[in-house]
Image (cartoon, grey):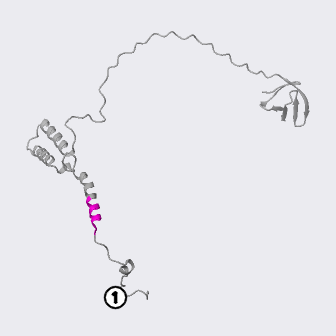
């Protein structure tokens, strides 16, 4: 419970806003009134178009008349003539939605076909057959001589280690073929 806040007889706390602010709110000055008038003048063109028509063309007298004509055609007991109905719809759309008198092509319509003259192609001489570059010579593995052996494998005359795997010698690229003292490794 707040003991410092003064209370009215009904128990509600009194406000000390007037005491804190020092004075009551000022009346609007001529400058404030002038600024409000300028803001209204700035917004006025948005309410009326440049040609004098109201901003909402759906409520214009031209739109209301065109819609009444269209409704009258649609309300006829017999089916209205398609040409009359189409003209009334175009007129209502122009009056209510704006736009120009010209007919427009819809955006997804394909372009009319264009005639393109045939291209005169000069006969080309066949290019001289190019001789393919020779393939690089394949390295033929030359047999090497086994120089030293131990229980794990052998060394050949090119300094490579050939590991023993059962009865086979395996070089750095696979299984070697043994021909007496000569060895061929891939």
Between 52 and 34, the one lying in front of the other is 34
Image quadrant in which you'd find residue 127: top right
Q: Secondary structure at mark 1?
A: loop
Q: Work out which residue is located at the far front of the displayed protein and give it.
A: 30
Image quadrant in which you'd find residue 149: top right
Horizontally, is 4 left or right of 56 in the view? right
User: In this view of the protein, can residue 69 be seen by the observer?
Assistant: yes
Quadrant assignment for the C terminus: top right
Figure disc tally: 1
Between 140 and 27, the one lying in front of the other is 27
The x and y percentages for residue 89 are 17, 41
Vertical position of residue 150 compared to residue 76: above or below: above
Image quadrant in which you'd find residue 140: top right
User: In this view of the protein, can residue 166 be seen by the observer?
Assistant: no
Residue at the spot of label 1: 8
Magenta stretch: dominant secondary structure: helix
Q: Label 1 crowding class (10 Å Cα cut-off): few <14, some 14-19, many 20+?
A: few
Residue lying at 25% horizontally and 52% vertically, measured from the top left: 46
Horizontally, is 32 left or right of 121 in the view? left
Vertical position of residue 11 compared to residue 108: above or below: below
Q: Work out which residue is located at the far bottom of the displayed protein and give it.
A: 9
- Does 179 lie within the magenta span? no
Q: Which residues are magenta?
A: 28-37
């Amino acid at each position: 419970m707040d003991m410092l806040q003064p209370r009215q007889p009904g128990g509600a706390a009194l406000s000390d806003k007037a005491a804190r602010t020092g004075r009551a709110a000022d009346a609007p000055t001529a400058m404030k009134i002038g600024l409000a008038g300028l803001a209204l003048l700035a917004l006025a063109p948005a309410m009326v178009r440049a040609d004098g028509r109201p901003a909402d063309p759906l409520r214009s007298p031209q739109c209301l008349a065109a819609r009444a004509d269209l409704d009258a055609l649609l309300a006829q007991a017999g089916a209205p003539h398609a040409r009359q109905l189409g003209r009334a719809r175009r007129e209502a759309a122009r009056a209510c939605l704006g736009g120009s008198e010209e007919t427009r092509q819809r955006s997804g319509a394909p372009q009319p076909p264009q005639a393109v003259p045939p291209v005169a192609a000069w006969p080309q001489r066949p290019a001289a057959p190019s001789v393919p570059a020779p393939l690089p010579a394949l390295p033929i593995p030359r047999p090497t001589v086994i120089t030293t052996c131990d229980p794990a494998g052998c060394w050949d005359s090119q300094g490579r280690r050939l590991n023993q795997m059962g009865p086979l010698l395996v070089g750095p690229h696979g299984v070697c073929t043994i021909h007496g003292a000569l060895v061929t490794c891939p």
